[in-house]
Structure formats: C-alpha cells, structure tokens
Image (cartoon, coloured by chain):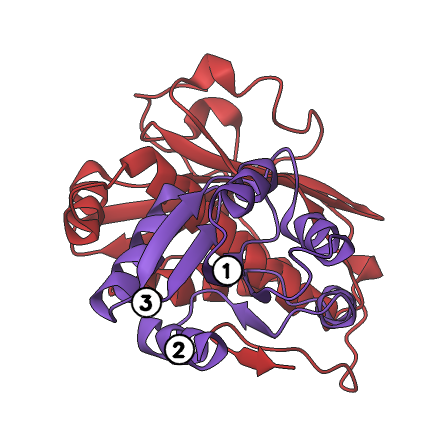
Chain colours: A purple, B red
C-alpha cells in the first residue's frame, strides 16, 4: 500500500486530507510542522508522496522541501505543496526546489487524491 | 473589548477596496465549507462596541502602508455545525484558525492584483478579550464585517491601518485561484 505523509499545522486539514487518502486506499502518516515532518520521513522509509503546507511553525514547508532535496536519501521523494499561498515567487521556488505540484486551498479532495495517485504510481 | 455590550454603529464605512476584498473572501471561504452567507454593510466601531463571540481566530498582516489584523468570530451554532461535519477529530479552535487562514489567503492573493505583497502571521485562537491586547495593532479603527447565516452572524473584524492610496490595480498581473492545481 502506498504511503503518504501529510504535513500541516492544522489538524482540520490533516484530518480532511488523511481521510480522503485513506478512503482511496492509501496509508497516511501525519506531521504538524516541518521539524515533525522530517522526523516522520526518517522513520518511514517507504513514503511515496509528501504533502506539505507552507506556513507552519518551527520549519515551514518550503524550507522543509529544501532540506529534503539536499539529502540524497530523500531527494527523490515526490512532494506536493498544499497551501493558501498563491504568490508566483513561492510557486517558482517550489518548482525550482523539485516539488511536483502546487495546490491552492481549499482544494477538492477528489482532485487532490488524483494528483497523489499519479505521483505515487 | 466588551463581550456583552450590544453593537452600536457609529459610522458606515466607505466601500473601499479592502471592504470588497474581505467580504468576497469571507463569502467564498464559507461557501467552500457549504455555508451560505449574506454580507451586511461594514461599519467602523469603537472597541467597546465590538461584540465578539469567543474563541476568536486572529491573524496579523503587514506590507508597506499596511499594519492590521483580522479577527474571526463565529456564532456557537455555526461552529457546532461545522465541527459536526468535520467528524470525530474535529477541534473547533483549529477549525477557526484554518478559516481565518483561508480568508487571509484570499486577501493576500487578491491584493497581489493591487501590487501588494502581504506578510502574515500564523493564525492563532484566543479565548478572552484580555488575550487580544498584545496581538492587535495599537493604531487604526475596528471595522466590523458581519455576515448573516442560517445559524447567526459571522463577524470578521479588521483592526489597524490600511493606506489604500498604495493599492494600484494592475490588469496585467496574473494570479492563481483557490482550488487551482499547478502540476510542474
């Protein structure tokens, strides 16, 4: 079963996304910020996709993405960004850093699941 | 800030850009959560006339000429309805933070068209009026944006100063919309 890590400081978002992914047959791991997210990545060697919020305490999503890409072990992970932010400079930064997609909240869960499935396959 | 004093409207705010953007952002966010809202005319109020249903969600934001905060207050019945829809792990405070965050996101996005890049704080939730003191800008009025729903009125309050002379609309700027999926 493909496994997805959802990193967001909002429990509401983690629950909503997690439930949609679970219903689609994906295993879900959660983290509440970028530091927590890096710890989960280290614990779960079988992650297929990471979904990162941008604005989080301790370590934001774009900085977490940079750290993942700097590490050879995690550089190949598929990352999508799920955020309220829509600034083109941020989108460009994520693209440059190797993210696969940028989704602007609120997103339809069926579309999110489709993107995740494609990235996971 | 008095939590029980009835609202007195001292003046009707003009309908500048920020009024329109905040009203449309709030309507849009609640629509996404399946809640129909009808905006009422915004009004500037003294702080002792602002009735807030606690807890409130708060987010501050800045840009050149802008230093303000948004406060979101929901009627209890609406909060209960939204929480019930979310399911067993639902936390009303977290949901309130996320709603405040979503409204801020829409405002940020729309202000890009006016060549303004906002920097915002993380959303927080506060339980009592005496917890707001250190969070809110000291200058600038409260503007109350109320929205009728079937479960009572939502209140979005803007506290602070916004220099609208710095908002210059540009029709050439492209923005992405909420719900957009950009695949690289």
| Rendered position, A91 above or below B58 | below
The quadrant where residue A20 appears = bottom left
How many other residues sit within 10 Å of disc 3, few (<14), some (14-19) or many (≥20)? few
- Asked if the residue under mark 2 is in contact with the one under mark 3, i.e. CB atoms within 8 Å, the reply is no
- Disc 1 element: strand
Residue at (52% x, 79% y) in the render: B181
Left/right of residue A72 with respect to residue B11 in the rendered view:
right
Q: Residues within 10 Å of mark 2 (few under 14, many from 20)?
A: some
In the picture, residue B108 is in which quadrant?
A: bottom right
Mark 3 residue element: helix
Q: Residue at x 27, y 55 (%)?
A: B148
What is the residue that sits farthest to the bottom in this orientation? B172
Mark in front: 1 vs 3: 1
Residue A21 position, x and y percent, is: 31, 65
**Residue A51 numbered tag:** 1
Quarter of the image with the C terminus of chain B in it: bottom right
Question: Which residue is pictured at 43% across the width and 41% down the height?
Answer: B97
Q: Which residue is mark 3?
A: B31
Measured Cα–Cα span from mark 2 to mark 1? 12 Å
The tag on residue B113 is none
Q: Nearer the viewer, residue B66 or B96?
A: B96
Q: Chain for mark 3?
A: B
Question: Residue tagged by mark 2?
Answer: A117
Instruction: Give the letter of the chain under mark 1.
Output: A
Residue B24 visible somewhere in the drawing? yes
Q: Are marks 3 and 2 on the same chain?
A: no
| Residue at 28 percent of width and 37 percent of height | B92
* Viewer-nearest of discs 2 and 1: 2
Between the C-alphas of marks 1 and 3, the distance is 24 Å
């Amino acid at each position: 079963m493909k496994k997805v890590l959802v990193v967001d400081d909002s429990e509401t978002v983690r629950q909503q996304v997690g439930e949609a992914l679970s219903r689609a047959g994906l295993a879900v791991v959660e983290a509440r910020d970028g530091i927590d997210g890096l710890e989960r990545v280290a614990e779960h060697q079988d992650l297929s996709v990471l979904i990162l919020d941008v604005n989080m305490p301790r370590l934001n999503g774009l900085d977490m993405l940079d750290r993942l890409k700097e590490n050879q072990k995690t550089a190949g992970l598929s990352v999508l960004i799920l955020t309220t932010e829509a600034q083109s400079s941020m989108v460009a930064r994520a693209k440059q850093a190797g993210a696969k997609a940028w989704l602007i909240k609120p997103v339809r869960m069926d579309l999110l699941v489709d993107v995740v499935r494609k990235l996971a396959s | 800030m008095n939590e029980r004093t009835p609202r007195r409207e001292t003046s009707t705010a003009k309908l500048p850009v920020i009024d329109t953007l905040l009203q449309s952002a709030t309507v849009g966010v609640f629509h996404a959560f399946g809640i129909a809202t009808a905006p009422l005319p915004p009004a500037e109020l003294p702080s002792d006339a602002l009735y807030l249903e606690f807890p409130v969600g708060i987010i501050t934001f800045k840009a050149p000429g802008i230093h303000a905060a948004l406060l979101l207050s929901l009627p209890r019945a609406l909060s209960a309805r939204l929480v019930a829809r979310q399911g067993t792990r639902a936390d009303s405070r977290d949901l309130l933070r996320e709603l405040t965050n979503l409204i801020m996101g829409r405002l940020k996005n729309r202000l890009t068209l006016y060549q303004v890049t906002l920097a915002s704080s993380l959303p927080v939730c506060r339980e009592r009026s005496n917890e707001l003191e250190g969070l809110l800008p000291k200058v600038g009025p409260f503007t109350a944006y109320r929205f009728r729903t079937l479960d009572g009125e939502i209140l979005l309050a803007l506290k602070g100063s916004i220099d609208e002379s710095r908002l210059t609309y540009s029709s050439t700027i492209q923005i992405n919309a909420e719900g957009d999926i950009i695949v690289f």
